[in-house]
């Protein structure tokens, strides 16, 4: 019986991984989404433009656990609730932003400039009803070359649609050495998830969070610009799992000896 349970568990993991790859959740050819690049490193020659119009090297900013939020400031969809949630988790967390960790908002739209970044920075800082270090949550823009290099490095996949873009959202944590350690997907974050990500990033540890399981169950809907429960994928995985369980039980079940 113990061997049967181990085989069933291993089979379930294989089925889940296959379903994820087949659904495009983590495959390199994902058109819209995030391909996790855990344990890889941010290139040391990516440059950003701060709210004063000054050029800064991204690696030079990584002096503590850092969450990178890739957005664009004119976004009519997911970026606003995403940045609202960032403000909420900063507000509710007892961690000290700017001291224990920092957040860098970076626009991947090269047509956006520092004036727009600064107005957004001021607006979202006003949502936090406690005193914080303003340098703990900074807003940047960048040019097309550096935008592409950054999005490729962290696995951020998007597609242009007219003047806007279709994309998902995640807080992407990197260590002070530029190592990618964790992704918090979606537009809602718990203080506990933030603390765990910051602590493990400070230790150089990497690993998937529960949001990775949620990203398997939920898919991004470009038309509705939101996440929807993927009934087909989840139901198919469950049905296939139980079919394999029944098959293994029938195959491995001891046969009764015939008595004469």
Image: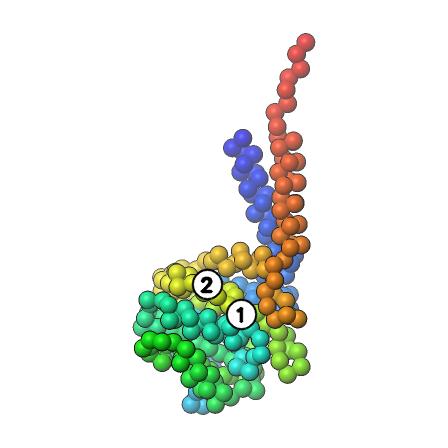
Q: Which residue is mark 2?
A: 182
Asked whether, in this view, residue 18 is left or right of residue 196, the answer is right
Question: Mark 2 or mark 1, which has the lower sequence index?
Answer: 1
The 10 Å Cα crowd at callout 2, few under 14, some 14 to 19, many 20 or more, is many
Q: Nearer the viewer, residue 157 or 232?
A: 232
- As displayed, is residue 35 above or below residue 162? above
How many numbered markers are drawn?
2
Is there any visible trace of residue 55 in the rendered image?
no
The 10 Å Cα crowd at callout 1, few under 14, some 14 to 19, many 20 or more, is many
Q: Nearer the viewer, residue 175 or 9?
A: 9
**Residue occupying the far top of the picture:** 260
Per the model, the C-alpha gap separating discs 2 and 1 is 13 Å
Residue visible at 45% across and 90% down? 53
Q: Report the quarter where the N terminus lies.
A: top right
Residue visible at 59% across and 52% down? 17
Asked whether, in this view, residue 90 is left or right of residue 216, the answer is left
Q: Which mark is residue 169?
A: 1
């Amino acid at each position: 019986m113990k061997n049967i349970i181990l085989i069933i568990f291993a089979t379930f993991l294989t089925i889940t991984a296959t379903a994820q790859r087949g659904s495009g959740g983590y495959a390199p050819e994902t058109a819209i989404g995030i391909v996790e690049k855990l344990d890889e490193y941010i290139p040391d020659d990516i440059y950003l433009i701060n709210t004063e119009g000054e050029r800064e090297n991204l690696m030079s900013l990584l002096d503590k656990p850092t969450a990178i939020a890739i957005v664009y400031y004119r976004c009519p969809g997911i970026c606003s609730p995403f940045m609202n949630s960032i403000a909420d988790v900063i507000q509710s967390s007892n961690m000290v932003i700017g001291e224990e960790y920092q957040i860098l908002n970076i626009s991947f739209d090269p047509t956006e400039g520092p004036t727009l970044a600064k107005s957004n920075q001021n607006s979202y800082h006003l949502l936090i009803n406690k005193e914080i270090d303003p340098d703990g949550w900074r807003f940047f823009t960048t040019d097309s070359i550096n935008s592409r290099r950054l999005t490729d490095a962290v696995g951020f996949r998007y597609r242009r649609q007219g003047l806007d873009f279709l994309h998902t959202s995640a807080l992407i944590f990197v260590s002070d050495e530029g190592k990618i350690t964790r992704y918090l997907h979606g537009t809602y974050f718990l203080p506990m998830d933030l603390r765990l990500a910051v602590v493990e990033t400070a230790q150089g540890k990497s690993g998937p969070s529960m949001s990775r399981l949620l990203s398997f169950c939920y898919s991004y809907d470009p038309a509705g610009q939101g996440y929807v429960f993927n009934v087909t994928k989840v139901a198919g995985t469950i049905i296939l799992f139980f079919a394999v369980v029944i098959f293994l039980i029938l195959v491995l079940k001891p046969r009764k000896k015939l008595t004469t």
